[in-house]
């Protein structure tokens, strides 16, 4: 019996074992079958999705959307322009602190796994199950790079499979360093910013190497949920996320406990920052953007092009300051319009001034400030992003109230008549805690400076502040040049027989129209008449009536044909005598390029502002080829030689005084006026500064400057155009909606001070340069009143220069013997 039970139990044991074996076998077979089916499905998925996956070649040649960058001639950054804000950096350029922060926040085992972190997947699943919420992600840095670079962000099984295959490819085709560097350049942070370098600039206004531990941890915490952890949108959540990143950095021994604790205590200082730049030239940047779009299409803005302009960074800074200071000074003369706003300050406690002033933006060199307290002759204010400043009486006393009739009230006797506690005002402040009260000017201005030898634009300011008003007055504002037009008319007069000694009557003139009511009675700006006046003196003193008589004598169409050589469009010229007073419309750039002809000795150079354009790889895709003024290539006209005709081919000789011509003919700018004409005009405009309407510029203490003021009727447009042999600058001041600038305002008072402020800095350390008098000019003594020749012993005689074939009556060009050449001097015209 016992034997039978033992046998039965043994049999049952064997049966159970076989059952286990069968079950295990079935499970093993199932696993193998499942694995095989999974592998087959994966293989089928790969084959199916292969056409949609990026090729190895395309992955290696991926092009990021990189904004257009605009630079000065020397390579200083002017602007970054594009829909996406991105600053590409190499792996080596990224500080270890930033790398460690991202490893701690996103993928601590990045350098250990093969792209898919299975340990991380299991860990994330366990945490999610325990917490009951999907808070842990399992995407590795490689997977995120694959997703952001090559795939959509759809949350579908298809996209997840694509992501897996691309991740596998990336891990086998790129080094870990390449993948990490790519990730840090493509990840999105909000604020239109892609990549860590753009994020550092957008959140903190810094480059990567300037970030501290707290800032690096803040940035590393953003990619998990850019809309949620954006430190500008939600500083509280961003601070919480930063704490997590700092804790992980400490746990991974990237930082010590003390560093983590100190960083945790720092307040969240992130705020929106505009892209960093080295040189402020936003009007030039916009011109470059438009030019690039025209040449290469709209997509060029995000293709990584680099535009190198002709802008000189130092001169551009000088131009910015000159225009802003000049407009502020003009604005002060016309009264204080009151504070920009007012906020209620608590009677006790320290207000949050930064928050109170946050809605007011800086405008040009003006900073918003809140008045904290007012004393008898001073005030204390809080300036945004700068702190407490003192406004002393010299910065307040100008603020006479603007009255309705465009006049100003009496000067204030104390600060309380100007400011009150809680006023929001604009100030010009320095870092030493001093400030001056200011206000946003209502008038506008423009300045453009050229190298007259090739036309390159070295400085350009299109208005007081681009971000307040993007209208570029240098290239878009077509205004009347007023008396700034007269040098071109006087050059035409010299070309057609007049001399600097020609005497013209400065007396009233009435020009009849179709009826008596259409009669035109022009006047000089002084409303005075000088009688018989030499042509030189008429230009120096900007006599309108003389200019009208000159135009009438030369002929309107003859003058238009001649003056159009300077680059002006003759279609815009009025065909009547008002042309003598500058009644056609021109831009400041038009005038500057016209005056460049006088500065360079007679050559028509074409203004340009782009030196070269490079693509994303650094290949030059376009380069300027300006035609240059080249006196060595164009021997001075000899006495008696004819002046060049409009549109004539530039003179070019194989040699100049035995020396080979330094430039090929195709690179030489066309000569449009004779060197003698240019030299005499230069000399006459130098007198405008020495003793005429531009004499305020004598304060520069230079003898190599020349120029001409310009003021239209009612001073709606005011100008100064001036130059040296190597720099031309034109300044315009007026209102965008044309109206008078006010009583006693004229070019010499509004535009000239801006020109002087710019040239003072531009010419600092530059030796004086004078052009050599060309052959074909004769210097003779004349009577200062009559313009007739005087003997060498004439006590009252003055010297005057003449083109050799346009001598006054009674003098031969070569022998000095009386002759009958040229326009007669000494008898007033009309």
Image: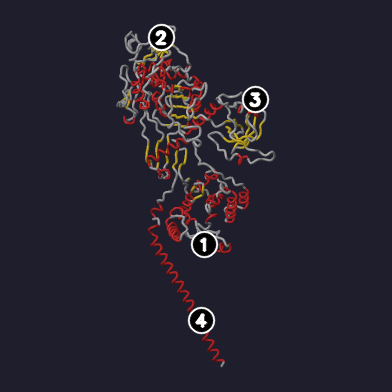
Of badges 2 and 3, the one in the foreground is 3
Q: Name the image quarter holding the N terminus.
A: bottom right
Instruction: Work out whether mark 4 precedes mark 1 in sequence or the reverse, and give the earlier one.
Output: 4
Q: Quadrant of residue 399?
A: top right
According to the picture, the residue beneath numbered tag 2 turns out to be: 786
Distance from disc 4 to disc 3, alpha carbons, whole Å, reads 111 Å
In the image, residue 239 lies at what x, y percent? 59, 50
Distance from disc 3 to disc 1, alpha carbons, whole Å, reads 76 Å
According to the picture, the residue beneath numbered tag 3 turns out to be: 413
Side of 588 relative to 109 (left or right): left
Q: Quadrant of residue 725?
A: top left
Above or below, 388 against 264 in this view is above
Of badges 1 and 2, the one in the foreground is 2
Distance from disc 1 to disc 2, alpha carbons, whole Å, reads 102 Å
Instruction: Work out whether mark 3 precedes mark 1 in sequence or the reverse, and give the earlier one.
Output: 1
Q: Name the image quarter holding the C terminus.
A: top left
Q: Residues within 10 Å of mark 2 (few under 14, many from 20)?
A: some
Of badges 3 and 1, the one in the foreground is 3
Residue located 45% across and 12% down the image? 530
Side of 96 relative to 295 (left or right): right
According to the picture, the residue beneath numbered tag 1 turns out to be: 121
According to the picture, the residue beneath numbered tag 4 turns out to be: 17
């Amino acid at each position: 019996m016992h034997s039978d039970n033992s046998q039965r139990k043994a049999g049952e044991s064997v049966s159970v074992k076989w059952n286990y074996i069968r079950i295990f076998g079935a499970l093993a077979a199932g696993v193998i079958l499942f694995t095989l089916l999974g592998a087959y499905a994966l293989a089928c998925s790969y084959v199916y999705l292969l056409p949609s996956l990026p090729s190895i070649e395309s992955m290696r040649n991926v092009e990021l959307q990189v904004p257009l960058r605009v630079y000065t001639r020397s390579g200083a950054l002017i602007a970054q322009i594009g829909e996406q804000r991105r600053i590409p950096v190499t792996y080596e350029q990224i500080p270890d602190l930033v790398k460690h922060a991202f490893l701690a926040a996103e993928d601590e085992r990045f350098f250990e796994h093969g792209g898919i972190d299975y340990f991380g997947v299991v860990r994330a699943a366990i945490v999610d199950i325990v917490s009951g919420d999907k808070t842990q992600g399992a995407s590795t840095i490689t997977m995120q790079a694959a997703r952001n670079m090559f795939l959509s962000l759809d949350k579908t099984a298809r996209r997840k499979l694509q992501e897996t295959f691309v991740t596998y490819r990336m891990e086998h085709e790129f080094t870990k360093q390449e993948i990490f560097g790519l990730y840090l350049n493509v990840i999105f942070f909000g604020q239109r910013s892609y990549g860590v370098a753009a994020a550092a600039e957008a959140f903190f206004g810094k480059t990567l190497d300037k970030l501290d531990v707290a800032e690096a941890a803040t940035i590393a915490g953003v990619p998990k949920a850019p809309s949620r952890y954006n430190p500008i949108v939600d500083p509280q959540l961003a601070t919480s996320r930063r704490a997590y990143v700092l804790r992980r950095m400490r746990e991974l021994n990237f930082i010590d406990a003390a560093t983590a604790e100190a960083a945790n205590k720092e307040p969240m200082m992130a705020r929106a920052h505009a892209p960093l730049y080295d040189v402020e030239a936003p009007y030039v940047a916009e011109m470059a953007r438009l030019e690039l779009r025209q040449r290469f299409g709209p997509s060029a803005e995000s293709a990584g092009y680099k535009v190198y302009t002709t802008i000189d960074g130092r001169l551009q800074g000088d131009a910015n300051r000159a225009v802003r200071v000049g407009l502020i000074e003009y604005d002060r003369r016309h009264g204080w319009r009151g504070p920009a706003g007012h906020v209620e300050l608590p009677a006790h406690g320290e207000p949050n001034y930064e928050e109170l002033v946050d809605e007011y933006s800086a405008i040009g060199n003006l900073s918003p400030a809140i008045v904290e307290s007012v004393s008898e002759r001073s005030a204390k204010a809080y300036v945004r992003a700068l702190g407490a400043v003192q406004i002393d009486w010299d910065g307040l006393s100008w603020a006479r109230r603007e009255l309705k009739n465009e006049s100003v009230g009496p000067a204030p006797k104390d600060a309380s008549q100007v400011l009150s506690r809680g006023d929001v005002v604009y100030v010009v402040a320095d870092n030493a805690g001093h400030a001056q009260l200011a206000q946003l000017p209502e008038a506008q201005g423009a300045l453009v400076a050229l190298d007259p030898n090739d036309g390159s634009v070295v400085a350009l300011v299109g208005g007081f502040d681009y971000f307040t008003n993007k209208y570029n007055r240098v290239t878009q504002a077509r205004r009347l040049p007023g008396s700034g037009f007269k040098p071109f008319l006087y050059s035409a007069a010299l070309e057609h027989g007049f001399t600097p000694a020609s005497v013209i009557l400065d007396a009233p003139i009435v020009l009849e129209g179709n009826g008596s009511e259409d009669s035109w009675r022009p006047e000089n700006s002084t409303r005075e008449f000088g009688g018989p006046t030499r042509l030189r003196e008429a230009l120096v003193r900007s006599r309108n009536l003389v200019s009208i008589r000159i135009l009438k004598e030369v002929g309107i169409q003859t003058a238009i044909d001649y003056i159009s050589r300077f680059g002006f469009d003759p279609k815009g010229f009025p065909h009547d005598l008002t042309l003598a007073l500058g009644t056609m419309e021109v831009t400041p750039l038009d005038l500057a390029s016209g005056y460049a002809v006088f500065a360079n000795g007679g050559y028509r150079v074409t203004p340009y502002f782009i030196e070269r354009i490079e693509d994303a790889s650094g290949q030059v895709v376009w380069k300027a080829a300006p035609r240059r003024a080249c006196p060595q290539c164009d021997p001075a006209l000899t006495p008696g030689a004819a002046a060049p005709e409009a549109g004539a081919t530039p003179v070019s000789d194989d040699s100049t005084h035995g020396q080979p011509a330094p430039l090929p003919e195709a690179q030489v700018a066309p000569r449009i006026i004779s060197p003698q004409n240019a030299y005499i005009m230069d000399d006459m405009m130098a007198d405008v500064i020495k003793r005429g309407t531009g004499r305020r510029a004598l304060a520069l203490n230079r003898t190599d400057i020349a120029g001409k003021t310009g003021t239209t009727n009612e001073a709606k447009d005011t100008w100064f155009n001036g130059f040296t042999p190597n720099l031309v600058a034109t300044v315009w001041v007026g209102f965008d909606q044309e109206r008078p600038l006010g009583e006693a305002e004229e070019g010499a008072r509004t535009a000239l001070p801006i020109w002087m402020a710019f040239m003072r800095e531009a010419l600092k350390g530059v030796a004086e340069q004078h052009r050599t008098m060309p052959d074909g000019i004769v210097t003779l003594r004349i009577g200062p009143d009559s313009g007739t020749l005087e003997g060498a012993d004439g006590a009252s005689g003055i010297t005057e220069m003449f083109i050799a074939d346009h001598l006054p009556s009674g003098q031969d060009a070569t022998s000095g013997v009386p002759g009958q050449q040229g326009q007669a001097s000494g008898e007033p015209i009309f």
